[in-house]
Amino acid sequence: MESPIFSHPDSQLLRQYIRRQRRELSIHYRRQAGHAVVRHIRKQSTFMHATKIGLYIDAFGEIPTQSLIKLCLKLKKSIYFPVVIAKDQPLAWAQVKAKYTSRMTSHRFGMKQPSKQRGLSVMDLDVIFMPLVAYDDKGHRLGMGGGFYDRSLSRCMEKPFNNKRSHRQHFKKPYRVGMAYDFQRVDLLETNPWDISLHAVVTPTQYQRFNTVARDSFLH
């Protein structure tokens, strides 16, 4: 499936276009995409050295996360799912165990989340895998429009990631990785001052890192 060619598109029209493309994907295609991104992720030292991983539960045709969840559990990593407290509040991140499916509920926006409302702040996570509608080669991300991730990540503090094998890699926690199909890449997204960019994006065919140093004052 080819990527749409957009430059500063109307965000709402772009959301409608790409979400329609995602809905047309077969279950088999989505499942294979979920396996493919995990093959890239497990090669990344940032992920392998992380202990607290933020993940989402796919609900609207996003890259499935079941394979990544299984990998995290196998590697004894702690998994956290987002919890919507209120529309204008940052997300809380609740830890889940292997049999998490029996302890989920649906919030008013139609997505599954842990039934417990208490959780960590996003800045306590090491790596967060984020859903998206579109991204560009500068690491800009277009979400669903609710602003939950941008609002939560805006509160992060400068805090180095504890990489035991390297003293040179420092960045604002958590390390932000978008998960997308290849056709979700666009030429250029229109951005707002409150938008939070990505450190990397993983698709079924590649793991792409972005130069976020200049924009976010990260130290690498």
Image: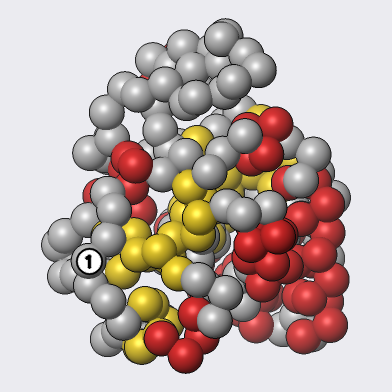
Q: Name the foreground residue: 85 vs 143.
A: 85
Query: Is 35 located above or below residue 9 in the figure?
Result: below
Rendering quarter of residue 111: bottom left
Say what amino acid the circle numbered 1 marks: Arg
- Crowd rating for badge 1 (residues with CA inside 10 Å; few <14, some 14–19, many 20+): few
- Percent position of residue 57, x then y: 52, 73
What's the residue at 62%, 34% (across, down)? 49
Q: Name the foreground residue: 13 vs 167.
A: 167
Helix or strand or loop: what does disc 1 sit on? loop
Q: Which residue is mark 1?
A: 118
What's the residue at 40%, 85% (across, down)? 104
Query: Is 209 located above or below residue 61 in the figure?
Result: above
What's the residue at 79%, 85% (across, down)? 26
The type of colouring in the image is secondary structure
Seen from this angle, which residue lies furthest front? Answer: 76
Rendered-image quadrant of the C terminus: top right
- Percent position of residue 18, x then y: 61, 68
Q: Is residue 106 visible?
A: yes
Rendered-image quadrant of the N terminus: bottom right
- Percent position of residue 40, x then y: 80, 46
Circle count: 1
Give left or right: position of 27 versus 99: right
Query: Is 6 located above or below residue 187 in the figure?
Result: below
Rendering quarter of residue 139: top right
Q: Is residue 198 visible?
A: no
Rendering quarter of residue 208: top right
What's the residue at 73%, 46% (across, down)? 41
Give left or right: position of 36 versus 84: right
